Image (tube, coloured by chain):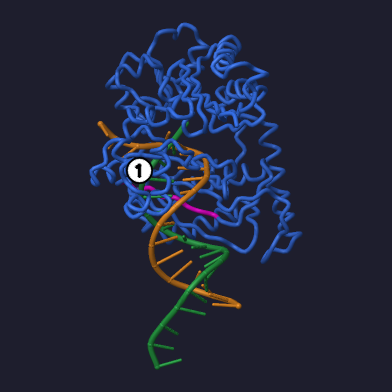
Chain colours: A blue, B orange, C green
Amino acid sequence: MAEAVLFHVDLDAFYASVERRDDPSLQGKAIIVGARPGSRGVVSSCSYEARRFGVRSAMPIGEAYRRCPHGVFLPVRMRRYLEVSGQVMELLRSYAPVFQQLSIDEAFMDLSGTGRLYGPPEQLGERIKQQVRLGTGLTLSIGIAPNRYLAKLASEACKPDGLLRIHGGEEAAFLEGLPLARLWGVGDKTRQRLSELGIDTVTALRGLSEEALCGAMGEAGGRYLYRAARGIEPGAFSAEPKSRSLSSEMTFESDVASAKTIGRCLLELCQQVMYRLIKDDLSSNTVFLKLRLFDFSTTTAQKTVGHWLASSEELHKLVLELLGQRWDGSTPVRLIGVGAANVLSSGHPVQGELFEDEFARRRKVEEAVTRLRERMEGVRLTKASLIHPPEDAP
DNA sequence: TCTGGGGTCCTAGGACCC
DNA sequence: TCTGGGGTCCTAGGACCC
């Protein structure tokens, strides 16, 4: 059987590259997309010019400013990035019978058996890169390998604007040279834990039996690492998630201890969550609250009810109950979040407490609000309690 | 340095049922 | 009387990724 051919395609410094393409005067500059300097927030994306000064994604924005004060700091324009991403993904999809988008800026393409149609994979890769460059002005990196996991590592290794193919049989040689942290799925904690076991390289990791790894890292973790170290697809990219969840959260500019302010912001988050459920025709019977306190300690609480959640008021009521269980009313709060878990597409029968027409009635009201919001884009449509100025406002 | 926002998956304990 | 084995669901926390 012919070797499987998987592409992992990854747009380089995506948000920053879109900004540069939309404003050519940014060419050659250190672009840093993310939170406003001086605020609580992080870098979402930065150009390679900025990386030379040590700026990285997820770095606190203040730290990025210290390292690169002459950088161009820009806010995130998610709508624009989604638009450009859509153009690129559409092009990629047209080549691949089996296509899996992983995130806004990366995707897998299964091109096994397309040699006769497209020629050698490396040639096809170059053609795709050129087409994307001409069509959108963006560069991307492509990893080609016999499975998705290796393809992902390959694109990572050849960034930016690269192309790298790993053939079957070359797995060991490729992995040999990689630092442990480059393995997808190995983060800080796992690296530390392995280091305590005397494991600091992929080669050393390969010296451990599957049993030993499972004993040290747990059943699933051990099996994962055993395979990852050998370039065997460890099952890292499931095609369909087991369950879905959806959430909205916000970090306060400075910590808040006012129950009134927190309650009002929670209502707004509940509205956002309910809006998204309805817009995508989804149902959920589980609500969760997330709290991060002044000291960055984080706690969550959740509750499952016997019916589908039908309105943002109901969501808000449940969330306030959870808040009562988790917050003493005076500890300063840094972040609050609200979410729905056990999310399914609607059309499932309504169960339990609420009569069907009562559920339908409430849902109709929410749907009307949703439609209004969509029509009046940019207009703030919100509950009266959110419009009044907060009593504790300056 | 002082840590966003949106997700998925795993673990472990307890409740409950057969 | 003192104890099984499994399965499923729920909950809280944590690791990891983009």
Name the residue nearer the viewer: A76 or A142.
Answer: A142
> Quick one: quadrant of the N terminus of chain A?
top right
Q: Percent position (x, y) of residue A389?
A: 49, 41
Q: Percent position (x, y) of residue A32?
A: 40, 20
Query: Residue A144 in magenta?
Result: no
Name the dominant secondary structure of the magenta segment: strand
Decide if residue A316 is in sight here: yes
Range drawn in magenta: A287-294
Name the residue nearer the viewer: A80 or A123.
Answer: A123
Name the residue nearer the viewer: A226 or A56.
Answer: A226
Q: Percent position (x, y) of residue A44?
A: 43, 27
Residue type at the position of mark 1: Asp
- Is A372 drawn above or below residue A68 in the view shown? below
Query: Residue A293 in magenta?
Result: yes
Chain at tag 1: A
Return the residue at label 1: A255
Residue reaching furthest front? A1
As drawn, is A115 to the left or to the right of A267?
right
**Quadrant of residue A78 in the image?**
top right
> Quick one: quadrant of the C terminus of chain A?
top left
Dot 1: within a 10 Å radius of its alpha carbon, few (fewer than 14), some, or many (20 or more) residues?
some
- Name which residue lies at 62% across and 22% down: A92
Residue reaching furthest right? A357
Decide if residue A394 is in sight here: no
**Quadrant of residue A304 in the image?**
bottom right
As drawn, is A76 to the left or to the right of A367?
left
**Secondary structure beneath label 1:** strand
- Is A227 drawn above or below residue A113 in the view shown? below
Q: Percent position (x, y) of residue A137?
A: 54, 11
- Name which residue lies at 61% across and 46% down: A274
